[in-house]
Image: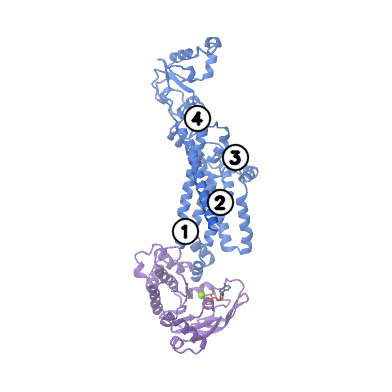
Chain colours: A purple, B blue
């Protein structure tokens, strides 16, 4: 298993945000996390690159494993973990730099200084994010000049550049128009060959289109987790069924 | 209800109209008074400079006149005349040449005597009230008394507003003094201000920030005389000792005080800019394995750069317009500064120091108003620049 959660409980102060989560996600799959707003999807996703570390008064119990290793173990270096577990956020948020520098950023902050290697990785990442053809002639222009959809693919390229094995995506298409959204979905489909992807989404159709497995969260609990097809056609849990039919209807 | 709303709307409209008109009137007044300078003659009103009519020189600029009277120009050939040493005759000297009887009871013979002296000395230049030179007869010629020119003001290297017969209103030393003190102040304040802003926005927890922020705002509220007094009593002696110079009132001292005064502006504006960096942008950086410091200097500062530039510009604006504190600690020597450890005089300090002694409506008074116009243009340019920068900032975060 690429990603595993073992009896995870997470608290924001007194608020019990995640309640006894168990999940095992195989490598090179796309897993969608669905559920109503505020049910803890983002909180759960962010556990796997330790983005919740700096939240004051937060508490975590249970084990988070990536590639079999407990990532909250004292021996784990957070920056090394983040090199292996990339993240794409909800709104496209390029750095105030050129397109090239945006993609090169992760390499540079991790101490890579070989210019030739950086240039190669920038190109490979932009190709992998299906953005290369659109930007190859303006790599040194500001990333702000790109459209929203292009910016989001740039953010994906930026995450890919440091060669992670896991890619966490928190509603990556929710701020985009339908055409840009379908480009991102296509991209996700192609990326699973090399990466394990976990994507939070509000959009049922999107979950159905892109994912192999789906997890349904509600009130901090993982209600159901199974193959996407089964989840949408024949859910075991009545809450899941209500939610899915309600969202499709 | 409707009527009340109408009434209120009318009142607000009126007060904005009145405010705009008042501001406009102030500016018009400033420029009208200031530009009066260029309609005033070089030589004091009611006086004239007279030379022998055989002398080929016809006009002199204010600097030449001043140099003649200071003895810096001693020969007519230096200013386009013949090779003759200059014989300068001041008005009061006439009384040691002629006795009171010779001049007559009501000085009625004075014009005649002057005419004699001028015709006898081809190298003379005489400075006299016009009324004693009733008519310009053949041996005597008046130096053309032109109006003060814009170049005399803009390119003038000396500010000597009270010398006779022709005061010098060159703004170069004042402009240089102002710019030197202001930019040096920003140079000093920027590293500190930015450091504090970064600390407050990125590192300090809410409790510490809640204590430091109000303290800094308090700093902004202290009257500038108090800063000036502090500078005079504490910083001036320190600079004097450390620099081993005769007087501690220098450009550097002024910059130090101004730096302290500009700090609140720089800190609060750049801290706001830094805090405006979206959380998602910081998180994206952390998510790529960047440390907090890498995130600060590679993402947060570049994102806030326009806000920081605006802070710098506004800080300079604050420094350029500051009067009292600078007046108290810079020594006010109106000379072109050659080092930061020399006395300088800024434009606002000049206005404040001299307006009281300048006779209303006179050339000195007009020149001070013109300095006000120059200062106004400086700050106008600065606020336009900061406006452009902050527009860029909003379009970026949108
Ligand atoms: N930093 C935080 N501090 C306190 N409570 C939080 C914080 N972040 C999220 N929460 C709360 O935790 C719950 C789950 O949030 P989140 O994981 O963002 O939900 P989702 O992504 O499913 O919409 C919500 O009730 C939210 O209000
Ligand atoms: Mg969320």
Q: Nearer the viewer, mark 4 or mark 3?
A: 4
**Sequence-wise, which precedes: disc 4 or disc 2?**
4
- In the picture, the quarter occupied by the C terminus of chain A is bottom left
Q: Is residue A25 above or below residue B332?
A: below
What residue is disc 4 on?
B167
Q: Secondary structure at mark 1?
A: helix
Same chain, marks 4 and 2?
yes
Residue B305: image location, x then y, percent: 48, 58
**Sequence-wise, which precedes: disc 4 or disc 3?**
4
Same chain, marks 1 and 2?
yes
Q: Nearer the viewer, mark 1 or mark 2?
A: 1
Of all chains, the one bearing label 1 is B
What residue is disc 1 on?
B393
Q: Is residue B154 visible?
A: yes
**Sequence-wise, which precedes: disc 4 or disc 1?**
4
Q: Quarter containing ligand 1? A: bottom right
Is residue B142 rendered to the left or right of residue B191? left
Q: Nearer the viewer, mark 4 or mark 1?
A: 1
What residue is disc 3 on?
B245
Of all chains, the one bearing label 2 is B
């Amino acid at each position: 298993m690429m990603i595993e959660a073992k009896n995870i409980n997470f608290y924001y102060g007194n608020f019990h945000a995640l309640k006894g989560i168990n999940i095992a996600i195989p490598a090179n799959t796309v897993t969608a996390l669905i559920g109503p707003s505020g049910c803890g999807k983002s909180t759960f996703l962010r556990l796997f690159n330790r983005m919740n570390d700096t939240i004051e008064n937060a508490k975590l119990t249970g084990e988070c494993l990536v590639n079999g290793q407990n990532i909250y173990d004292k021996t784990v270096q957070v920056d090394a973990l983040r090199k292996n577990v990339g993240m794409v956020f909800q709104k496209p948020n390029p750095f105030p730099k050129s397109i090239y520098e945006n993609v090169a950023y992760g390499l540079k902050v991790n101490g890579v200084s070989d210019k030739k290697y950086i240039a190669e990785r920038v190109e490979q990442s932009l190709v992998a994010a299906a953005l290369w053809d659109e930007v190859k002639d303006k790599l040194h222009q500001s990333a702000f000049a790109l459209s929203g959809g292009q910016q989001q693919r740039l953010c994906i390229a930026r995450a890919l550049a440091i060669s992670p094995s896991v890619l966490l995506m928190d509603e990556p298409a929710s701020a985009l128009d339908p055409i840009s959204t379908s480009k991102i979905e296509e991209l996700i489909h192609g990326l699973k060959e090399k990466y394990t992807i976990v994507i939070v989404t509000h959009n049922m159709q999107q979950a159905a289109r892109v994912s192999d497995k789906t997890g349904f969260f509600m009130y901090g609990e993982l209600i159901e987790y199974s193959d996407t097809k089964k989840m949408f056609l024949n859910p075991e849990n009545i809450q899941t069924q209500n939610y899915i039919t309600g969202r499709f209807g | 209800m409707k009527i009340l709303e109408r009434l209120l709307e009318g009142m607000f409209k009126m007060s904005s109209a009145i405010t705009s008109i008042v501001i406009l009137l102030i500016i018009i007044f400033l420029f009208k008074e200031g530009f009066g300078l260029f309609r005033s003659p070089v030589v004091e009103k009611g006086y004239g400079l007279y030379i022998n009519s055989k002398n080929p020189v016809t006009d002199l600029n204010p600097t030449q006149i001043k140099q003649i009277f200071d003895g810096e120009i001693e020969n007519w050939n230096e200013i386009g005349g013949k090779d003759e040493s200059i014989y300068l005759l001041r008005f009061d000297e006439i009384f040691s040449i002629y006795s009171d009887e010779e001049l007559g009871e009501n000085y009625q013979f004075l014009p005649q005597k002057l005419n004699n002296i001028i015709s006898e000395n081809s190298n003379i230049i005489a400075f006299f009230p016009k009324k004693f030179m009733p008519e310009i007869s053949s041996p005597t010629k008046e130096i053309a008394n032109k109006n003060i020119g814009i170049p005399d003001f803009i390119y003038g290297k000396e500010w000597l507003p009270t010398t006779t017969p022709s005061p010098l209103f060159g703004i170069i030393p004042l402009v240089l003094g102002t710019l030197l003190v202001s930019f040096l102040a920003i140079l000093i304040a920027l590293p500190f201000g930015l450091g504090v802003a970064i600390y407050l926005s990125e590192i300090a927890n809410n409790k510490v920030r809640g204590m430091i922020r109000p303290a800094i705002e308090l700093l902004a509220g202290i009257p500038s005389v108090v800063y000036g007094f502090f500078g005079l009593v504490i910083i001036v002696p320190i600079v004097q000792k450390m620099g081993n110079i005769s007087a501690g009132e220098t450009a550097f001292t002024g910059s130090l005080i101004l730096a302290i005064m500009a700090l609140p502006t720089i800190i609060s504006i750049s801290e706001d800019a830094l805090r405006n960096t979206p959380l998602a942008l910081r998180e994206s950086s952390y998510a790529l394995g960047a440390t907090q410091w890498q995130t600060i200097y590679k993402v947060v500062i570049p994102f806030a750069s326009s806000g920081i530039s605006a802070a710098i510009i506004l800080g300079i604006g604050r420094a350029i317009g500051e009067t009292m504190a600078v007046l108290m600690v810079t020594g006010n020597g109106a000379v072109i500064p050659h080092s930061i450890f020399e006395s300088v005089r800024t434009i606002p300090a000049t206005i404040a120091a001299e307006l009281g002694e300048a006779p209303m409506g006179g050339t000195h008074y007009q020149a001070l108003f013109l300095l006000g116009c120059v200062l106004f243009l400086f700050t106008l340019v600065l606020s336009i620049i900061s406006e452009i920068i902050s527009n860029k900032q909003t379009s970026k975060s949108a």
